[in-house]
Image: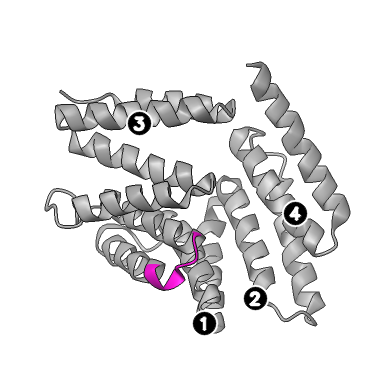
Amino acid sequence: MKIEIDRVLGRLDRLLAAKDYSAAEAHLKYWLGEAEACGDKAARLTVLNELMGFYRRGGSEESARRYAQAAIEGYGSDNDFCNTVFFATTCLNAATVYKAFGEPERALPLYERCRSIYDRKLEPDDVRYGGLYNNMGLALAELGRVDEARSAFDAAISVQEPFGSETALDRAITWLNICDLEEAENSEAIDSCIEKAYELIIDPSIPRDAYYAFVCEKCAPVFGFYGYFIYEKELSEEAGEINKKYERI
Protein backbone atom coordinates (compact mmCIF):
# COMPACT_ATOMS: atom_id res chain seq x y z
CA MET A 1 0.00 0.00 0.00
CA LYS A 2 1.24 3.48 -0.87
CA ILE A 3 0.47 6.45 1.33
CA GLU A 4 -1.04 9.53 -0.32
CA ILE A 5 1.79 11.71 0.88
CA ASP A 6 0.49 14.90 -0.74
CA ARG A 7 -2.61 14.71 1.44
CA VAL A 8 -0.45 14.13 4.51
CA LEU A 9 1.66 17.18 3.71
CA GLY A 10 -1.39 19.29 2.88
CA ARG A 11 -2.89 18.56 6.28
CA LEU A 12 0.46 19.31 7.91
CA ASP A 13 0.66 22.69 6.18
CA ARG A 14 -2.79 23.63 7.45
CA LEU A 15 -1.91 22.66 11.02
CA LEU A 16 1.35 24.62 10.93
CA ALA A 17 -0.35 27.66 9.41
CA ALA A 18 -2.82 27.57 12.29
CA LYS A 19 0.11 27.12 14.73
CA ASP A 20 -1.46 23.95 16.10
CA TYR A 21 1.92 22.43 16.80
CA SER A 22 0.79 19.62 19.08
CA ALA A 23 -1.62 18.38 16.41
CA ALA A 24 1.09 18.72 13.74
CA GLU A 25 3.47 16.63 15.83
CA ALA A 26 0.85 13.93 16.41
CA HIS A 27 -0.03 13.98 12.71
CA LEU A 28 3.60 13.38 11.67
CA LYS A 29 4.19 10.63 14.19
CA TYR A 30 1.01 8.85 13.15
CA TRP A 31 1.99 8.85 9.49
CA LEU A 32 5.54 7.77 10.29
CA GLY A 33 4.05 4.72 11.96
CA GLU A 34 1.72 4.10 9.02
CA ALA A 35 4.59 4.37 6.52
CA GLU A 36 6.65 1.90 8.52
CA ALA A 37 3.72 -0.48 8.91
CA CYS A 38 2.97 -0.65 5.19
CA GLY A 39 6.59 -0.58 4.05
CA ASP A 40 6.32 2.66 2.08
CA LYS A 41 9.98 3.72 2.24
CA ALA A 42 9.52 6.92 0.23
CA ALA A 43 6.69 8.13 2.47
CA ARG A 44 8.72 7.25 5.56
CA LEU A 45 11.66 9.33 4.34
CA THR A 46 9.36 12.24 3.55
CA VAL A 47 7.94 12.16 7.07
CA LEU A 48 11.41 11.83 8.62
CA ASN A 49 12.42 14.99 6.75
CA GLU A 50 9.36 16.80 8.05
CA LEU A 51 9.98 15.61 11.61
CA MET A 52 13.59 16.75 11.70
CA GLY A 53 12.54 20.16 10.38
CA PHE A 54 9.63 20.39 12.81
CA TYR A 55 11.81 19.69 15.84
CA ARG A 56 14.67 21.88 14.59
CA ARG A 57 12.34 24.87 14.27
CA GLY A 58 10.91 24.12 17.69
CA GLY A 59 14.34 23.89 19.32
CA SER A 60 13.94 20.22 20.31
CA GLU A 61 17.54 19.16 19.80
CA GLU A 62 17.31 15.52 20.86
CA SER A 63 14.29 14.75 18.68
CA ALA A 64 15.66 16.66 15.67
CA ARG A 65 18.96 14.78 15.88
CA ARG A 66 17.21 11.43 16.28
CA TYR A 67 15.14 11.80 13.13
CA ALA A 68 18.07 13.25 11.17
CA GLN A 69 20.18 10.26 12.13
CA ALA A 70 17.37 7.84 11.27
CA ALA A 71 17.06 9.35 7.80
CA ILE A 72 20.78 9.40 6.99
CA GLU A 73 21.58 5.98 8.43
CA GLY A 74 18.41 4.36 7.13
CA TYR A 75 18.71 5.57 3.55
CA GLY A 76 22.37 6.49 3.02
CA SER A 77 23.25 3.00 1.78
CA ASP A 78 19.91 2.16 0.21
CA ASN A 79 20.51 1.90 -3.54
CA ASP A 80 16.95 3.00 -4.26
CA PHE A 81 17.54 6.34 -2.55
CA CYS A 82 21.19 7.17 -1.80
CA ASN A 83 21.96 8.68 -5.22
CA THR A 84 18.68 10.56 -5.67
CA VAL A 85 17.83 14.24 -5.37
CA PHE A 86 15.37 13.15 -2.68
CA PHE A 87 18.22 11.85 -0.52
CA ALA A 88 20.39 14.88 -1.37
CA THR A 89 17.69 17.10 0.10
CA THR A 90 17.59 14.81 3.12
CA CYS A 91 21.33 15.38 3.58
CA LEU A 92 20.72 19.13 3.39
CA ASN A 93 17.96 18.94 5.99
CA ALA A 94 20.00 16.77 8.35
CA ALA A 95 23.00 19.08 7.97
CA THR A 96 20.82 22.03 8.86
CA VAL A 97 19.81 20.24 12.07
CA TYR A 98 23.44 19.75 13.07
CA LYS A 99 24.29 23.35 12.16
CA ALA A 100 21.33 24.65 14.19
CA PHE A 101 22.52 22.82 17.29
CA GLY A 102 26.14 23.88 17.18
CA GLU A 103 27.87 21.30 15.00
CA PRO A 104 28.79 23.03 11.72
CA GLU A 105 31.76 20.69 11.34
CA ARG A 106 29.35 17.75 11.23
CA ALA A 107 26.98 19.61 8.90
CA LEU A 108 29.51 20.49 6.23
CA PRO A 109 30.19 16.93 4.94
CA LEU A 110 26.45 16.42 4.53
CA TYR A 111 26.15 19.65 2.56
CA GLU A 112 29.02 18.43 0.39
CA ARG A 113 27.28 15.10 -0.12
CA CYS A 114 24.14 16.95 -1.15
CA ARG A 115 26.11 19.04 -3.62
CA SER A 116 27.79 15.95 -5.07
CA ILE A 117 24.39 14.44 -5.86
CA TYR A 118 22.99 17.72 -7.16
CA ASP A 119 26.00 18.05 -9.48
CA ARG A 120 25.17 14.68 -11.01
CA LYS A 121 21.41 15.05 -11.15
CA LEU A 122 20.55 18.73 -11.62
CA GLU A 123 21.24 21.48 -14.11
CA PRO A 124 23.74 24.08 -12.80
CA ASP A 125 21.07 26.78 -12.69
CA ASP A 126 18.54 24.71 -10.73
CA VAL A 127 17.01 26.85 -8.00
CA ARG A 128 17.64 24.13 -5.40
CA TYR A 129 21.32 25.05 -5.42
CA GLY A 130 20.35 28.37 -3.86
CA GLY A 131 19.15 26.82 -0.64
CA LEU A 132 22.18 24.55 -0.50
CA TYR A 133 24.69 27.38 -0.97
CA ASN A 134 22.95 29.59 1.58
CA ASN A 135 23.04 26.87 4.23
CA MET A 136 26.63 25.97 3.40
CA GLY A 137 27.53 29.63 3.82
CA LEU A 138 26.14 29.66 7.33
CA ALA A 139 28.16 26.59 8.33
CA LEU A 140 31.34 27.98 6.76
CA ALA A 141 30.83 31.32 8.52
CA GLU A 142 30.46 29.61 11.88
CA LEU A 143 33.69 27.71 11.24
CA GLY A 144 35.47 31.00 10.55
CA ARG A 145 35.92 30.32 6.84
CA VAL A 146 34.70 33.78 5.92
CA ASP A 147 35.86 34.02 2.31
CA GLU A 148 34.33 30.64 1.48
CA ALA A 149 31.12 31.65 3.23
CA ARG A 150 30.91 34.87 1.21
CA SER A 151 31.45 32.92 -2.01
CA ALA A 152 28.67 30.51 -1.03
CA PHE A 153 26.24 33.37 -0.31
CA ASP A 154 27.15 35.06 -3.60
CA ALA A 155 26.53 31.76 -5.41
CA ALA A 156 23.13 31.43 -3.72
CA ILE A 157 22.05 34.87 -4.90
CA SER A 158 23.36 34.24 -8.42
CA VAL A 159 21.31 31.07 -8.72
CA GLN A 160 18.15 32.58 -7.25
CA GLU A 161 18.13 35.99 -8.93
CA PRO A 162 16.82 34.83 -12.35
CA PHE A 163 13.69 33.48 -10.64
CA GLY A 164 12.54 36.97 -9.62
CA SER A 165 9.88 37.28 -6.95
CA GLU A 166 9.69 33.50 -6.62
CA THR A 167 12.97 33.57 -4.68
CA ALA A 168 12.77 37.09 -3.28
CA LEU A 169 12.32 36.00 0.34
CA ASP A 170 15.19 33.52 0.11
CA ARG A 171 17.48 36.20 -1.32
CA ALA A 172 16.44 38.60 1.44
CA ILE A 173 17.53 36.06 4.03
CA THR A 174 20.84 35.59 2.21
CA TRP A 175 21.52 39.34 2.18
CA LEU A 176 20.91 39.43 5.92
CA ASN A 177 23.32 36.52 6.35
CA ILE A 178 25.94 38.50 4.42
CA CYS A 179 25.52 41.34 6.93
CA ASP A 180 26.94 39.07 9.62
CA LEU A 181 30.11 38.54 7.59
CA GLU A 182 30.90 42.22 7.26
CA GLU A 183 33.19 43.96 9.70
CA ALA A 184 31.39 46.14 12.23
CA GLU A 185 33.01 49.25 10.82
CA ASN A 186 31.93 48.44 7.28
CA SER A 187 28.59 50.16 7.78
CA GLU A 188 28.22 51.05 4.11
CA ALA A 189 28.29 47.37 3.08
CA ILE A 190 25.87 46.45 5.85
CA ASP A 191 23.47 49.25 4.93
CA SER A 192 23.48 48.07 1.31
CA CYS A 193 22.70 44.49 2.32
CA ILE A 194 19.92 45.64 4.64
CA GLU A 195 18.26 47.75 1.97
CA LYS A 196 18.45 44.95 -0.60
CA ALA A 197 16.89 42.52 1.88
CA TYR A 198 14.10 44.94 2.79
CA GLU A 199 13.21 45.72 -0.83
CA LEU A 200 12.95 42.01 -1.58
CA ILE A 201 10.70 41.31 1.40
CA ILE A 202 8.23 44.11 0.64
CA ASP A 203 7.88 43.10 -3.02
CA PRO A 204 4.09 43.44 -3.54
CA SER A 205 3.97 40.44 -5.88
CA ILE A 206 4.89 38.02 -3.06
CA PRO A 207 1.87 36.22 -1.57
CA ARG A 208 1.17 37.33 1.99
CA ASP A 209 0.79 33.77 3.28
CA ALA A 210 2.01 31.77 6.28
CA TYR A 211 5.52 31.43 4.85
CA TYR A 212 5.69 35.18 4.30
CA ALA A 213 4.72 35.71 7.94
CA PHE A 214 7.40 33.23 9.02
CA VAL A 215 10.08 35.09 7.04
CA CYS A 216 8.94 38.45 8.46
CA GLU A 217 9.14 37.06 11.99
CA LYS A 218 12.58 35.61 11.31
CA CYS A 219 14.01 38.73 9.70
CA ALA A 220 12.45 41.49 11.80
CA PRO A 221 14.86 41.09 14.77
CA VAL A 222 17.83 41.18 12.37
CA PHE A 223 16.71 44.57 11.07
CA GLY A 224 16.34 45.72 14.66
CA PHE A 225 19.81 44.44 15.57
CA TYR A 226 21.32 46.66 12.89
CA GLY A 227 19.28 49.66 14.00
CA TYR A 228 16.53 49.54 11.38
CA PHE A 229 13.74 49.73 13.93
CA ILE A 230 11.08 51.01 11.54
CA TYR A 231 11.63 48.01 9.27
CA GLU A 232 11.56 45.71 12.29
CA LYS A 233 8.26 47.16 13.51
CA GLU A 234 6.67 47.07 10.05
CA LEU A 235 7.54 43.43 9.40
CA SER A 236 6.55 42.32 12.90
CA GLU A 237 3.16 43.97 12.56
CA GLU A 238 2.58 42.47 9.12
CA ALA A 239 3.45 39.01 10.40
CA GLY A 240 1.02 39.51 13.26
CA GLU A 241 -1.82 40.47 10.91
CA ILE A 242 -1.21 37.43 8.68
CA ASN A 243 -1.07 35.09 11.67
CA LYS A 244 -4.36 36.48 12.99
CA LYS A 245 -5.97 35.68 9.64
CA TYR A 246 -4.84 32.07 9.87
CA GLU A 247 -6.01 31.76 13.45
CA ARG A 248 -9.54 32.61 12.27
CA ILE A 249 -9.54 29.88 9.60
Q: Nearer the viewer, mark 2 or mark 4?
A: 4
Q: Residues within 10 Å of mark 4 (few under 14, many from 20)?
A: some
- Which quadrant of the figure has residue 166? top right
The residue identified by callout 3 is: 29
Q: Horizontally, is 20 left or right of 47 in the view?
A: right
Three-letter code for the amino acid on which mark 2 is drawn: Leu
Find residue 119 and report its horizontal and vertical position in percent.
30, 65
Q: Judging from the image, what secondary structure is the residue with disc 2 in?
A: helix
Q: Horizontally, is 158 left or right of 175 in the view?
A: left
Q: Which residues are magenta?
A: 101-106
Q: Residue furthest right?
A: 230
Find residue 64 and report its horizontal and vertical position in percent.
41, 49
Which mark is first along the chain, 3 or 1? 3
Task: Please say whether residue 22 is one of the residues in the magenta stretch.
Answer: no
Q: Residue at x 36, y 23 (%)?
A: 7
Q: Residue at x 67, y 17 (%)?
A: 248
The residue identified by callout 2 is: 181
Q: Residue at x 53, y 68 (%)?
A: 138
Q: CA distance from mark 1 to mark 4?
A: 25 Å
Three-letter code for the amino acid on which mark 1 is drawn: Arg
Q: Is residue 136 visible?
A: yes
Which mark is first along the chain, 3 or 2? 3
Q: Nearer the viewer, mark 2 or mark 3?
A: 3
Find residue 220 and report its horizontal and vertical position in percent.
74, 51
The residue identified by callout 1 is: 145
Find residue 242 and report its horizontal and vertical position in percent.
71, 30
